[in-house]
Amino acid sequence: MGVVRKWVFPVVRILLIAAIAVALGKLAFFPDKTDDVSAVPTGEIVEPVIPVALGTIVNDVVVQSTVTADPAAPLKSTAAGTVDEIFFPQGSVVAAGDTVFDVKVEIVRSPEDSIDEEGKTKPKIYRYEQVTAPAAGVLSSLGVISGQDVTIGMVAGQIAPPTFSVSGSLQPEQRYRLVDQPTDASIAITGGPAAFTCTGLRITTPLAGSEGGNTGGDTTGGGAVGGASTGGTGGGGGSTTTVSCAIPGEITVFSGLAAEMTISGGKAENVLVVPTTAVRGAALSGTVWVSLADGSTEERAVGLGLNDGSQVEITGGLVEGDQILQFAPGALADPSGCPPGAMDCGGVIAR
């Protein structure tokens, strides 16, 4: 037994270790060979195709806006002369047409009428021109005093009206979505009253060479609203298109409040619609790719109508049931370049 433990077991262990080492070496340096099978692609890329179908498009453009007090109306002297009497001090509430002060104007006599029967120079005679408030409001400033000389057209004061407007910047390309120029908008004041309608909507872009403000602007939409500033500068390059409208007098607001202006660009029902991704072009005209029966595609010009940011109305070039590529080369998801629902695209939300 001692011989077995001394010689047999150690020899067996050595043989086992050697067998394991040989097996590991074979696995490491002489792996089993398998047949070399080259991978051959069997699939193909298929462009997704969708049918042209009837649908409804509601085209709303939402503009992030601000409430501002309408600008003061300048009180201008209507004659050259001397301020005679001031009827309303600064800070007074005035109505349109109220006389704020009058101007004493000398009446120049003719040479034959300037000497009396005794040969003496006749005394000066005067007329009095009334300077009236051009609008109702508060006389926020008055820069003249009794006895002061004034000239025609001289700004003698300012009248701040009690009215407010809401305005915001509109991306120029967003005007394509307003096919029919709107005259009103829905206004939601942040932290304020329920949404209400403002009228007299103005869309204004300064003309080249203008100095901003309301003068010389390209205005579309409703009637004039005080304080609709374009915010542009002279030269016209990079001018801002501004959309604004008057806040009804019964709505309580404060200057500086944030607001959301929703402008309805129209609604089209039971019209041909396709995704904006299927059209190259965003307004008035575009191009789609029609899938033909033989599997090929045909580029086709189409007319475009309303666009809600995800779908666009087809006004010509296609009929219901036509098959078109879902993704056209170079197509935008929204005419403004903004993805649907974007919160920061020049103040405009695409919906």
Image (spheres, helix red, strand yellow):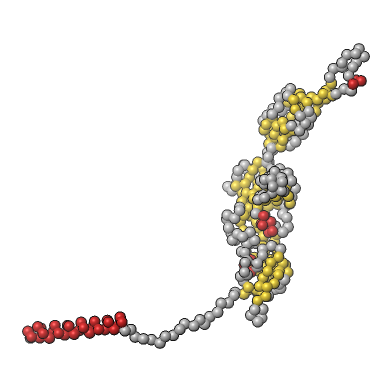
The quadrant holding residue 290 is bottom right
Residue 249 location in percent, x, y?
69, 43
| Residue 346 horizontal side relative to residue 234, left or right | left
How many badges with numbers are in the image?
0
Residue 86 location in percent, x, y?
73, 26
Q: Is residue 246 visible?
A: no
Q: Is residue 231 visible?
A: yes
Where is 330 relative to 181, above or below? below
Where is 166 relative to 102, above or below? below
Comparing 45 with 225, the one in front is 45
| Residue 188 horizontal side relative to residue 183, left or right | left
Residue at left offset 76%, top offset 33%: 153
Residue at left offset 69%, top offset 66%: 286
Residue 108 location in percent, x, y?
85, 23
Image quadrant where one finds the C terminus: bottom right
Residue 42 location in percent, x, y?
52, 82
| Residue 121 horizontal side relative to residue 16, left or right | right
The quadrant holding residue 177 is bottom right
Comparing 32 with 54, the one in front is 32
Residue at left offset 47%, top offset 82%: 39
Image quadrant where one finds the N terminus: bottom left
Task: Point out the residue furthest to the left here.
Answer: 2
Task: Point out the residue furthest to the bottom here.
Answer: 35
Residue at left offset 9%, top offset 83%: 6
Task: Point out the residue furthest to the front here.
Answer: 29
